[in-house]
Amino acid sequence: MKLVTYQMLNSHELRTGIWVSKYEVIDVAAEAAARQSQLNVTTMLDVIDGGAETLALLAEIKNSPKTTPVLLNSALLKAPIPRPRKNVFCVGWNYLDHFSEGAASMQDSRELPQWPVFFSKASTAVTGPYDAIPFNANVSTQLDWEVELGVVLGKAGKNITEADAMSHVFGYTVINDVTWRDIQRRHGGQWDKGKSLDGTCPMGPCIVTADALDPNDLHVECRVSNVVKQQSNTKHLYFKIPRLIRDLSLGQTLEAGDIISTGTPEGVGFARKPPEWMRPGDLLETEIRGIGVMRNPVGQM
Ligand code: MG
């Protein structure tokens, strides 16, 4: 199933939906109420918290001939989890080619990592799959792109084993780990600041539930104003999803609704010669086949 958070015209209220075709969603709360269900399906986090019982209700709703989809303007799709409960966990250097281009641009000869690099993006950085990315030249002009597979957890845990890790996954989404590159670098090597400015975490357009997608062979691509900048496949992830969950949960509680952005492949702007940055008027397209495409214009703040 593809699950979305959407907004109806003339309303600020966010609703949870099952995305059944390009312009059609099923209003989950309305259909649950029609069935007199007591399950809370108001927000995506409610759906995730509800576990298998709630997913079974959604499957029943989706497959029912009585269900009437709502027509949707795609611009009204929001980030599937518009405000996560905590920062988005992120992984650095998780495709070998990106590791190499980073080492080359820094002119060093670092060794392959034994452990994943973890950092996070502020929950307030999350923005919708079609929302504008704010640009303010007084803040920075080095606006870079990073297409990444996002993993959404559905079950809490600590000290999770690799063998058990995938049972903690609720589903998958597309994330662009948008980065203000000079800000990322100038704070003593701590990446959080340059990756946490408002609008730097486009997410969406949906969450595909784990039962419906194999995350190990997905084409990932990033385009800036119709020019392909990044193209790879999740089969090239250096640290696979179970290893990431194992290492991240070591001595640390992970919760339902937590999001892990799994790292970006080669082709980012800073490593190009000369370096390339996005400018106002550019269109950032972030795609993972099997999940969807986000289209974020770069706009003035
Ligand atoms: Mg990244």
Image (tube, grey):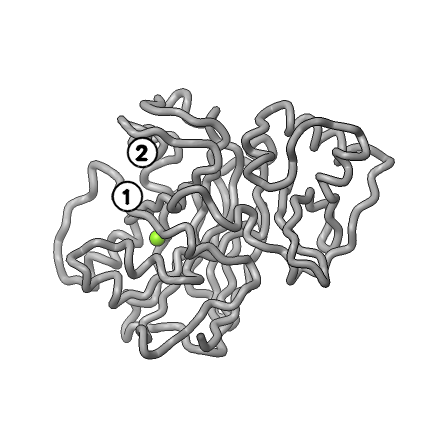
Give how far apart the Cα atoms at labels 1 and 2 are.
8 Å
Callout 1: CB less than 8 Å from ligand 1: no
Residue 98 falls left or right of residue 190: right
SS at mark 2?
A: helix
The N terminus appears in which quarter of the rendering?
top right
**Contact flag, marks 1 and 2 (Cβ < 8 Å):** yes
Q: Residue type at mark 1?
A: Phe
Viewer-side residue, 294 vs 276 = 294
Viewer-side residue, 121 vs 267 = 121
Q: Residue at x 52, y 33 (%)?
A: 170
Q: Residue at x 82, y 39 (%)?
A: 67
Compared to residue 233, the image places residue 59 above or below, namely: above
Q: Which residue is mark 1?
A: 118
Q: Which residue is mark 2?
A: 248
SS at mark 1?
A: strand
Q: Residue at x 32, y 41 (%)?
A: 238
Q: Residue farthest to the right?
A: 66
Compared to residue 53, the image places residue 208 above or below, namely: below
